[in-house]
Amino acid sequence: MQQVEIADILARHGEKEGGLISILESIQAKYGYLPREALEEVAEKTGHALVDVYGVATFYKAFSLKPRGKHLISVCLGTACHVRGGPQIAKEVKRQLGIRPGETTPDKEFTLETVNCLGACALGPVVVIDGHYFPNVKTSMVKGIIDRARDGLDKVEVDKDARVFPIEVSCARCNHSLMDTEHKLDGYPSVRVTVSFGQKHGWLELSSLYGSYNTSSKYEIPENTIVNFFCPYCNAELMGGSLCSECGAPMVPMIVRGGGMVQICSRKGCKGHMLDLL
Amino acid sequence: MIKLKINGVDVSVEEGSTVLEAAQFLGFPIPTLCHMEGLTPYGACRLCVVEIGNPPRSKLVSSCTYPAEDGLVVRTSSERVMRARRMIIELLLATCPQSKIIQDLASKFNVRQQRFKQEYEDCILCGLCVRMCEEQMMAKAIGFRGRGENRSIGTPFDIKSEVCRQCGGCIYVCPACQLRCTYNEPEKAICGGCANLAPPCLEKENFHDMMCYMDPCVACEIRKENN
Ligand code: SF4
Ligand code: SF4
Ligand code: FES
Ligand code: FES
């Protein structure tokens, strides 16, 4: 059965050379880790030596050779989060789950990893669970967050989706407000960012109404293109570490005024998004 | 032909040579560790540093990977080079003191101290074995795994490789395996204790069908005696 699925993945990536990393990503997305048989199959089918495939699989932190738990908890220990107490958060998560980074709880519920910067430094210390950002985490909040994750974070989100309300957001890097009061969309100030795709580079305005997908931009963005988002103030790239659950494109995290994070999919036309309010 | 100047001597070498090859052709010795004729230059150990350009704008490069260029000015044993080389040896000693090759280098370059935290690694990640296996033995049985401080050499999943022919090539080229001390007493590893030679193949079963390049080898003799 697995053989068939891997053959599928390989077929989708075609014959072209150099697609090893994306093949491994697809396998990891499917199984949550890279099973040994899968790597052997990839080596055989793509003509790469097994040592090379294994070397790539062990080089990148994003790949895991061990089965992962249902929920992936990433604690940021990047510079900004480190000085704001990331290590204490990591310690508390370790204590709560009884595992060390890189390990999975015996009940296969949680896998813990530490990462170096998730692209939301202004919010440090940051914890990401299954793609949901938790900003300004304190040790006392850790237990609550883990319990919420155990119940399923995506469930919490659904009832928020039903409502349509305006949100105010700021850059996850420099915390500068991204609201543009001069240009309104849906009757509310829009969210203004800079985007680039192909050779084009220009502004993009998004409706701040949560649940509305209206945008306007300097250049017409073709459907399905993954665009790069930048903060117009600090010019940092806004791409975060998590991937869209709908289409697999990188998510763009932004800070919600009042506490919380919103993430939108970077693919034009994809409606993937997540909102976590605190 | 490419014309360059090495240690003040004008020399011309064939297109495509490296600085190391040019210097060796001229007879200027440059120590190497991760370089071996017949294998792709890799530039891992940095032992072959040379100084190129004119001070104060000169820089240090690894000669085994640096292509000879027209008009290049190279110095193979300037003070700066020697200082860097000694430091590299000192760091190698800190990593893998039990290697006879590294010990010999240390004595040759008069390195008499080791100021870093002492480790006892059995590999300096020079990549010789990986290149040997791939380029000469056409096996690709072993490779680099992991990264940073977890980088290591071995087979995928650490299990016996189906493509390894047990040719012994990897062991033959390894500067850390060759004449390795048993390091029963790590602290004494730089002491010349290798006189009491007891290589790892004495204890490890899986070395049995390994072809040995150290013929005649003390270890084999000891084993014969024991049986
Ligand atoms: S013994 Fe095996 S791993 Fe070593 S060089 Fe030969 S084929 Fe490669
Ligand atoms: S095992 Fe030996 S030859 Fe291979 S990289 Fe390590 S030190 Fe070099
Ligand atoms: S340092 Fe933690 S998000 Fe950048
Ligand atoms: S011999 Fe040149 S870097 Fe090792």
Image: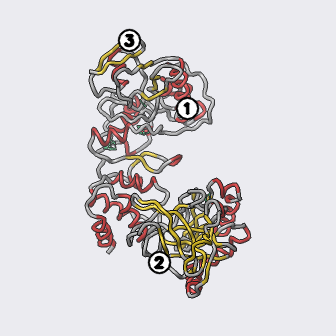
Provide the chain ID for the residue under circle 3: B
| Earlier-in-chain disc, 1 versus 3 | 3
| Ligand 1 shown in quarter | top left
Q: Are marks 3 and 2 on the same chain?
A: no
Bin the neighbour count of mark 3 within 10 Å (Cα to Cα): few under 14, some 14-19, many 20 and up.
few
Query: Which of the 4 quarters of the picture holds residue A77?
Result: bottom right
Residue B82: % across, % down? 52, 20
Q: Nearer the viewer, residue A171 or B191?
A: A171
Tag 2, which chain?
A
The reply to whether residue A130 is in sight is no
Mark 1–mark 3 Cα distance, whole angstroms, equals 32 Å
B96 left or right of B4 in image: right
Residue B187 percent coordinates (x, y)? 60, 33
Which residue carries the number 3 mark?
A: B9
Q: Amino acid at mark 3?
A: Val
Instruction: Give the SS element for disc 1.
Output: helix
Residue A29's x, y, as percent? 43, 69
- Write down the residue under mark 2: A271
The residue beneath circle 1 is B91
Q: Tag 1: Cα neighbours inside 10 Å, few (<14), some, or many (≥20)?
A: some
Name the amino acid type tagged 1. Leu
Residue A161 in view in this figure:
yes
